[in-house]
Amino acid sequence: MDLNKQQIALAVNDKSVGRSPFSFKGNCFKFLYGANDDERFHTRDIPPMRIKDIRIFEGEQLSYHWPLEEVADTRCTDDLRQEPAEVKNGVWLKPGHQYWKTIGSFQMNGNAVVAFDQRNEQLLLTGIDSIITYDLRQQQHARTAKAVEQENILIGCQSIYDTFSNQLYNVYIDHKKVAAYSPKHPQWTTTFPDTILTEFWHANKFISPVDTALYIIGGYGQLKYKNVIQRWQPRTGKWEMLPGRGSFFPPRYLAGLGLNATGDTAFIIGGYGSITGDQMLDPRGYNDLFAFDVRTRNFSKRFSLDSVYGSFTFANSLIIDAKRRQYYGLVFSKDSFNSRLQLLQGSLDKPVYKLTGTPIPYSFYDVQSFADLYYAPGVGKLIAVTLFYGDQELRQRKTKVDVYTIDFPPLDLNPVEDKATGRRGMLGKWLIFILLFFVAAIGALWWRLRKVGLQPEKGSSATNEREQVKAVSEEPDTTTAPVVEEPHPEEATIPEEELTELPEVPRSSIRLFGPFQAFNGEEELTGLFTPLMKELLLLILIYTVRTGQGITADELNEILWNGKSAKDAKNNRSVNLAKLKSILERIGNCMVNKKSVYWQFQYTEDHFYLDYEWFVNLTKRKATADRLVMTDLLRIVETGAFLAKTEYDWLDDIKAEVSNAVIDLSLGYLKEDRQAGEDPEFVIRVANAIFLFDRLNEEALEYKCKSLIQLKRYSLANNTYEKFVKDYRDIYGEEFYKSFNDVIR
């Protein structure tokens, strides 16, 4: 509402929808959202809506804020001025994030198994005569049943859905046997004859997109805990026992396992077992987190959790929250039949965790129970399933099934606080904070004036005096922030004629290719960045370069401080942004600044070098690379892969984007530049750059080997081929299909 221009405008997500002249009378307005009783606009004809964080601004100043984070009642209070607001026909969403809801409780014939179709968000429960499907996307009639006969399902059998082939698998590990079912061919491909009890109770499983194979890790049976890695290839039906590498992974069962976003790393946490694998020799509970690299088959131990809540074991699956670098699992005590499942939320980067949500009743007995956890991101729900099998000796082959859901992300069960008391307490804290701030500011000013007014001691040389005066004059003025013009996306683009004129390393720089580095002239300041400071800077910097806008405070909170209240997240963000600004002042010629709702990374172009922005502009401006562009690209990427040894889930897609750009430009140059073959040394440089981002690129192998042959470096060409073959074998588990002669032909 612009009173000066007499104009009313509407914007959605900071994008203008429309504007129109409007004759305002006065400066007091009423906003009507949804159902209302105004005599001119009276209506009840509206759809359901979800609302939160109602904010009213006057100019840039926030005047009112209703978070709408209550769990009951119809009255809300503004956080700033305690203005009341009434809610009609409200269904509060917060309890849905705190309490598990039972959506199904029934029996199935036979020893039922459970799987989840991640793509279609369907829970699949299989008995010997039917498949029950829960479609989480359906509000009504979500549960359907289909008559499908499976002659026998052995106790200890597990089920998993393969989204690559759209098939449901029932797996009995002991027989190395898999029964498959597809909606296109609605029958099972095989059945399981009766046999002894499994030796792989509660083993963990996953299907990796790296090779579309099924992996099974660990398990327990016949008084032995296992740590073996088994792999089944759906295309060939071949079973393999794979050797584990890296850190020693102690034998165990009742662990939780979850796959990362790219599907090449499995995280395994907790469980119960022993170092030797023998149940009689020192069995114990584990509280460690391991990462298993699918390509190299390396186990690496990340850390161990503190046993704050005593000993517990895990349901079969973990949910990996890539954005927030967190995991969720269901934990329970294995020492009691009448146990309870409790949702645990932990960090992938440090040994911190907490219990959240309400507990779920769980009857635990090794040979008669199973529990699992799934996530449906489309509907924003976690799904917990418990199975309890009948007594096998009494031939009671029925399974009790219970299905629960909770809204994601889950929230703690905090007691309702008296808001007025809380605000009075916060007011007092803010007054103390402001008082301390002024005391600190006055102290800093006094120290600065005293420092500027210092005189050299008697006997000091004229040279020392000049150096002291120079040091004082060069010290940056910290009383005012440096003014950096906001770069417009078009203005920030490197002109065509400057593409081949990368600057020499200036006084200040931040490097993202190779390991993360920050410099002030010759002095490296990388060590000033704590892990949190580094991630905060990278989020703001990368989002600024990629989008031209930056990143909002809400997005920062969601990634870095998820699970904290809005107030705590804001405090954490403010404190860490202040620390980050201080570090950037030491680097010089760069800063983080807020424009509208976006935090942006800004710098003075003539005195600061950011390799990532040069890279982005190089790749945007050139669909295909010529020799000059390729030279500039190599100068950037030859220092190493993009943010080597830096791993965040939100960064995975960006790394893939950088890798694809390097590979596409490099191969495009090698294929299309007719003069490329005249300089084999340069071709080798280009091939090596490709290998930094894809060490199994077959085209790069051919170009490099042919160029080495051209230079008569025959042994180096053969060594390059042999290393490639070894890496190919280690990652794919099979021999490379081309001989050396085929590669260089």
Image (cartoon, helix red, strand yellow):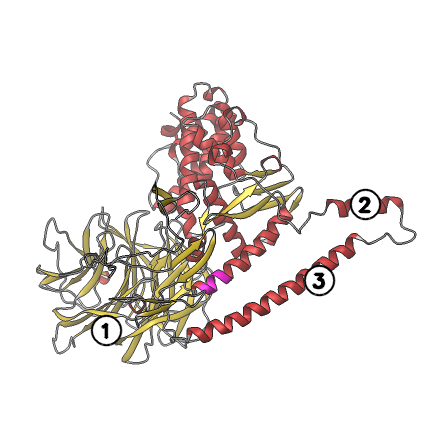
Please indicate whether residue 162 sits to the left or right of residue 479 in the image: left
Residue type at tag 3: Gly
Q: Nearer the viewer, residue 495 or 205?
A: 495
Residue 36, position as x, y percentages in the image: 25, 60
Label 1 belongs to which residue?
367
Q: Nearer the viewer, residue 458 or 267?
A: 458
Nearer the camera: disc 2 or disc 1: 2
Q: Is residue 366 above or below residue 200?
A: below
> Is-magenta flag for residue 362?
no
Look at the numbered disc 1 and give the secondary structure of its residue.
Answer: loop
Q: Is residue 279 visible?
A: yes
Query: Which dot, 3 or 2, sits closer to the camera?
Result: 3
Residue at point 28% right, 48% down? 212
> Could you classify mark 3 by the number of other residues whose Cα lies within 10 Å: few (under 14), some (14-19), or many (20 or more)?
few
Residue type pointed to by label 1: Val
Residue type at mark 2: give it.
Glu
Picture disc at residue 443: 3
Q: Residues within 10 Å of mark 2 (few under 14, many from 20)?
A: few
Q: Residue at x 36, y 55 (%)?
A: 29
Using a 10 Å C-alpha cutoff, classify the residue at mark 1 as few (fewer than 14 neighbours), some (14 to 19) or many (20 or more).
Answer: some
Q: Which residues are magenta?
A: 567-571
Among the two numbered marks 2 and 1 on one chain, the one whose residue lies closer to the N terminus: 1
Q: Which-is-in-front pick, marks 1 and 3? A: 3
Q: Are marks 2 and 1 in contact (CB under 8 Å)?
A: no
Q: Which quadrant holds the C terminus?
A: top left
In the structure shown, which secondary structural element does the residue marked by tag 2 occupy? helix
Q: Position of residue 449 (x, y in %)?
A: 76, 55
Sequence order check: which comes first, mark 1 or mark 3? Answer: 1
On the image, the x and y values in percent for residue 50 come to 29, 59
Task: Residue under label 2, please give it.
Answer: 467
